[in-house]
Image (cartoon, rainbow, N blue to C red):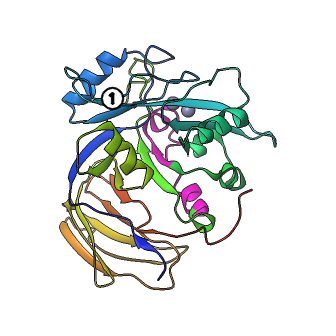
Amino acid sequence: MSASRFRYDTSGQWLKGNVHLHTTRSDGGRTPEQAAVMYAAAGHDFLVCTDHGIASNVGGEQAGRPLIWLDGIELDGTDDRGAFYHVIALGRFRDLSPDMELTDAMAAVRDQNGLLFLAHPHWCGNTMDDALRHRFDGVEAYNHVCRWLNGKSDSFAHWDRMLEERPNTLGLAVDDAHLKPQHPGWNGGWIVVNVQQRTSAAIYDAIRHGNFYSSCGPEFHDIELRRGHVAVRTSPVSFIRLVGPRTHGARIGSFQGETYTEAEFAIPDEWATVRVEIEDRYCRRAWTNPLFIQPTPLLPQDR
Ligand SMILES: [Zn+2]
Ligand SMILES: [Zn+2]
């Protein structure tokens, strides 16, 4: 991994946010204003508005708001092979309409420098090949509303398959909150970006570069590279793991109730991708993105 670059700079402030949220503009139960009050009270610093088929226009950090909004949209539809997708797009977009073909809408997002995240592939029934098409920037490794709906919340297997072919793929935890009685869950999956400034531009930049971790509970305090070792400090957890490709890994941990707040691991040169994952006593996990940014995809599959 000699040509790669360590991803993390955790010298700034940590900001918590949910990047998948529905409001009354589509099928959510709360207005953006109501959602912002709820999330700010739960310690969130930012939210991304991703209503179905409606590009939001709420971004910014205007005075008087309880948190910072970023713009987005959730797209859905089938591609030219008949595979059904939900896709989260981050950015402010023009000329997207609900009746567009999915592939046309994704192309428009790309043209406007937006980010595309494969949403809840386990819940959608996406195959591994589905996940490898369309050059997704990332995938929802955890989706909280899918846990509520039928338990199909975890898509780590899709993420790991994507990492084998596109080693910079980001892996997110999201609420996909709808904030209504039929879908009550929220504050169950989030990302925490590290930024030098508390602005929407800095948050968007941190997401684009993957300078964030994802969590369903535990916290990272520092993520550093020291002489070829990755060192982390965390909230008290039962396990700290170095996650490599396929069967590869290293760990400290306890099934007997001991807790840990720091660890340091050597990173084997031959691993093409590696991340750190922590797990607390309630089996809630948090995980980094791939620790190293590869200069180019290792393999040329843009299929
Ligand atoms: Zn969806
Ligand atoms: Zn959604």
Residue 154 counted in the magenta span: yes
Q: Say whether residue 258 is visible.
A: no
Categorize mark 1 by other alpha carbons within 10 Å: few (<14), some (14-19), many (20+).
Answer: some
Task: Decide: is 132 above or below 72.
Answer: below
Tell me which segment is drawn in magenta.
140-162
Task: Decide: is 295 above or below 215.
Answer: below
Residue 262: % across, % down: 20, 70
Disc 1 on helix, strand or loop? loop
Q: Say whether residue 28 is visible.
A: yes
Indicate the quadrant of ligand 1 in the picture: top right
Residue 235: % across, % down: 19, 58
Residue 253: % across, % down: 28, 71
Which residue is under mark 1? Answer: 60
| Left or right, residue 202 beside residue 129 | left
Task: Decide: is 82 above or below 159.
Answer: above
Name the kind of residue labelled 1 in the image.
Gly
For the residue pair 22 and 301, the one nearer the viewer reads as 301
| Left or right, residue 52 beside residue 143 | right
Residue at (54% x, 37% y) in the render = 88
Residue 234: % across, % down: 21, 62
Residue at (70% x, 20% y) in the render = 99
Residue at (51% x, 17% y) in the render = 26
